[in-house]
Amino acid sequence: MTLLFVLGKIAGWLTTPTNLLLAFLILGTALVWRRPRRSGRALLVLGIAGLIAIWTLPVGQWALLPLEDRFPQVTHPPAHVDGIIVLGGGVSPDMSAVRGIPALNGAAERVTTAAVLARRYPEAKVLYTSGSGELAPGAPDEATPAGALLAALGVAPDRLILESRSRTTYENVRESKALADPKPGQTWILVTSAAHMPRSVGLFRKAGWDVLPWPVGYKSATDARLWLPEDPGLMIQHLDVAMHEWVGLVGYWLEGRIDSVFPGP
């Protein structure tokens, strides 16, 4: 486990809106019992006001829209495809290990779309890339249950390439390229959530691997009727996802891992 990986996990936790607001509330509550109480009250007001804003305004939608609209859907699919890359995130490795069957989560479209594309392009390899992003050693990887699910959905085992070492999107790209060994002129489709696509494409470009973005798993829309879901928890979740991507874009750009802070078509 590298120091950079640990620092990245800590930075991700600190920049997640939910965690920040919760920290404000806890710290503010603790400080109001001490004199002077002004700083404690200020933190409580920030935490409460932040939660009210997230629950009453479509802040998460506004933050997600530019990310999800950055790469358009494919309207003219290629006639031939050599491979389909699926970035991990659609399967819960821990739940899969505990229950003994593949357990999908809120990004399940990554897996279902891969199965659909595999049927459309029967000669294409299907590369699923994801190890474990947990800090604790020995955590189960995601590629193994995902591969089992894709095989159950009709993808022949000899077409599957399972990459189970990577812990981050950067490592997804590095390890996948080493396994797939793509050749010039080949067509590889990249399947991942729409909000995750800008950061992912930037990494593939930096690695010299030209991919066809195939965004899925949309959580935002320009239709205002969809801005305020019935479940307030989704509004917080959407903002957390968006901030994770925006912070990731800036971080990867500062580290020189992508050439543009907001990669586009």
Image: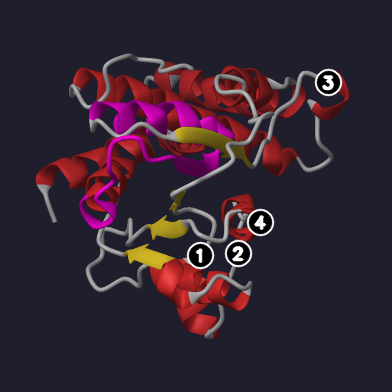
**92 up-or-down from 29: above or below:** below
Q: Label 1: which residue? A: 92
Side (left or right) of 195 relative to 74? left
The residue shown at (35%, 68%) is 141
Tag 2–tag 1 contact (CB < 8 Å)? yes
Question: Considering only order in the chain, which callout, 2 or 3, is on the residue closer to the N terminus?
Answer: 2
Among the two numbered marks 4 and 1 on one chain, the one whose residue lies closer to the N terminus: 1
Residue 243: image location, x then y, percent: 47, 27
For the magenta stretch, what is the residue range?
178-206
Q: Amino acid at mark 2?
A: Leu
Q: Can residue 31 be seen?
A: no
**Residue underneath mark 2:** 104
Residue 190 drawn in magenta: yes
- Of label 1 and label 3, which has the lower sequence position? 1
Decide which of 24, 245 is in the foreground and name it. Answer: 245
- Badge 4 is on which residue? 116
